[in-house]
Amino acid sequence: MPLHQLIYQSRETHKYTSHDFVELLEVSRRNNDNLNITGCLFYNGGWIVQVLEGEKHVIENLYEKITQDTRHKDCNLMQSIPIEKRVFSKWSMGMINLDTDKDSKYRELKAAMDDYQDGKVAIPLPIKLLRIFSQDYQSSTL
């Protein structure tokens, strides 16, 4: 089946705790393994950007559920495109918390997300996000 990639942005409806993130990742990884979905969630001060990769109908159904999830608001579909290969092939669901991860790449992405939120976008955020992280995470595992 052809692969598809969907990227969306949303805002949290309540402040996530470390326990919330652990629980979210455990459930997401289990569900995504069963659905053959890979991806990564980026968190930045209440804003979420998530990349989902898999069969088009599967990730579109998941995105529809996400838009109805009370933990999210202001869902914004940023990109939905066919892809030849997965960017986050090793991760059923990775997570990068830009509030706590502080190396230079995280600062670069945080700045890109802030620019996107402020309406100042030179390179579209999905492209920037993938450029920043795709090479590093091709061979990584969580």
Image (tube, rainbow, N blue to C red):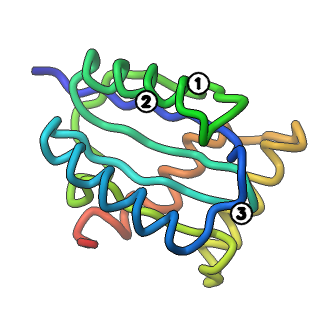
Q: Earlier in the sequence, mark 3 or mark 2?
A: 2
Q: Is residue 57 above or below residue 96?
A: above
Label 3 belongs to which residue? Answer: 110
Distance, label 2 to label 1, CA atoms, is 8 Å
Give yes or no for contact between labels 2 and 1 (Cβ–Cβ under 8 Å). yes
As drawn, the label of residue 6 is 2
Q: Which mark is residue 77?
A: 1
**Left or right, 128 with reference to 50:** right
Q: Nearer the viewer, residue 118 or 31?
A: 31
For the image, the number of numbered tags is 3
- Residue 128: image location, x then y, percent: 60, 49
Amino acid at pointer 3: Lys
**Does dot 3 land on a helix, a strand or a loop?**
helix
Image location (x, y in percent) of residue 54: 24, 32
User: Mark 1 belongs to which amino acid?
Assistant: Leu
Q: Which element carries disc 2, helix, strand or loop?
A: strand
Q: Is residue 29 left or right of residue 8?
A: left
User: Upstream in the sequence, badge 2 or badge 1?
Assistant: 2
Q: Looking at the image, which residue sits at the far top?
A: 57
Query: Mark 3 packing: few (<14 Cα in 10 Å), some, or many (20+)?
Result: many
- Circle 2 crowding by C-alpha within 10 Å: few under 14, some 14–19, many from 20: many
User: Which element carries disc 1, helix, strand or loop?
Assistant: strand
